[in-house]
Image (spheres, grey):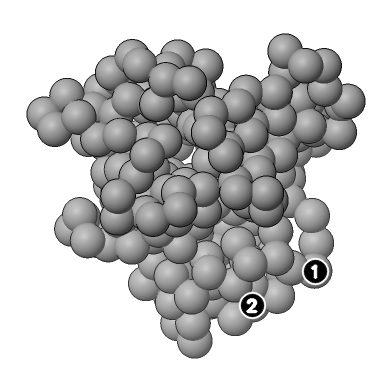
């Protein structure tokens, strides 16, 4: 049974999330403040974490930062804060997705299932010895598709599973421009409406890790008004 950790101080929302998740055969643990939530997240193993932003004792941004520093578990931010800056900040700290309150419980469950499924598919590929065709090379960048490793300028770049999947998707289609909506649909597998900031933040995080100069990217190019394009070899 898949395990979900809900870090949320609003009891009504917690009960709503728990009831729908349990009805879909998830095992649910609950923490009502940031400190307790962080302790649970680091001490135990979960398939996904639902994390509110406005929490007592420690806010969700800090909790997200601390979890991501030690674990690569999928994190979905759930918050009434609708400003783009909050979404971008949360995604920049390592969250995988952002769900605004109020939300449709069925949609939340669908997002949980989608993120867990993609995470498991990615992790199941790691550790497999690659053949030559499983390594993409562009300049001084190497992407080992089955080993789930990336090397830039001779040094390993440590990407989260979502970052790796996004980079691999673009690298497999060099020279093709993809809109943010198309990327979200292909990589996240969910309705892209209103979630283009997710793609932008993940692209920026990848650039920080693989580009010699992130301010002048040579591997992932921004095509203004259209989307992103990966460099041709």
Q: Determine the secondary structure under disc 1.
A: helix
Q: Which residue is mark 2?
A: 36
Say whether residue 198 is left or right of residue 152: left
User: Which label is found at residue 32?
Assistant: none
User: Which label is found at residue 43?
Assistant: 1
- Which residue sits at x=30%, y=20%? 178
In this view, the mark in front (1 or 2): 1
- Which residue sits at x=70%, y=59%? 71
- Which residue sits at x=82%, y=16%? 131
Q: How many marks?
A: 2
The image shows residue 153, relative to residue 124, as above or below, that is below
Comes first in the chain, label 1 or label 2? 2
Q: Position of residue 204 (x, y in %)?
A: 37, 50
Say whether residue 25 is left or right of residue 124: left
> Taking the image as drawn, is residue 80 in sight?
no
The image shows residue 150, relative to residue 9, as above or below, that is above
The image shows residue 168, relative to residue 153, as above or below, that is above
Q: Determine the secondary structure under disc 2.
A: helix
Q: Give whichever of 76, 150 is nearer the camera.
A: 150
């Amino acid at each position: 049974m898949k395990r979900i950790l809900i870090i949320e101080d609003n009891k009504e929302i917690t009960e709503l999330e728990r009831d729908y998740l349990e009805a879909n055969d998830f095992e649910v643990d609950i923490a009502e403040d940031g400190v307790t939530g962080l302790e649970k997240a680091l001490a135990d193993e979960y398939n996904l974490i639902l994390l509110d932003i406005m929490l007592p004792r420690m806010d969700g941004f800090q909790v997200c930062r601390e979890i991501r520093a030690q674990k690569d578990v999928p994190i979905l931010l759930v918050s009434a804060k609708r400003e783009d800056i909050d979404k971008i900040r949360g995604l920049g700290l390592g969250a995988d997705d952002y769900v605004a309150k109020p939300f449709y419980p069925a949609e939340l469950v669908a997002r949980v299932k989608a993120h867990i499924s993609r995470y498991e598919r990615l992790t199941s590929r790691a550790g497999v010895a690659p053949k030559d065709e499983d390594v993409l090379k562009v300049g001084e960048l190497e992407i080992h598709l089955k080993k789930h490793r990336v090397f830039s300028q001779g040094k390993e770049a440590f990407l989260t599973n979502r970052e790796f999947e996004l980079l691999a998707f673009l690298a497999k289609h060099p020279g093709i421009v993809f809109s943010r909506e198309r990327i979200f649909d292909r990589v996240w597998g969910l309705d892209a409406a209103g979630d283009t900031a997710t793609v932008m933040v993940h692209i920026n995080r990848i650039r920080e890790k693989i580009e010699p100069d992130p301010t002048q990217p040579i591997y992932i190019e921004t095509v203004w008004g259209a989307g992103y394009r990966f460099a041709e070899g």
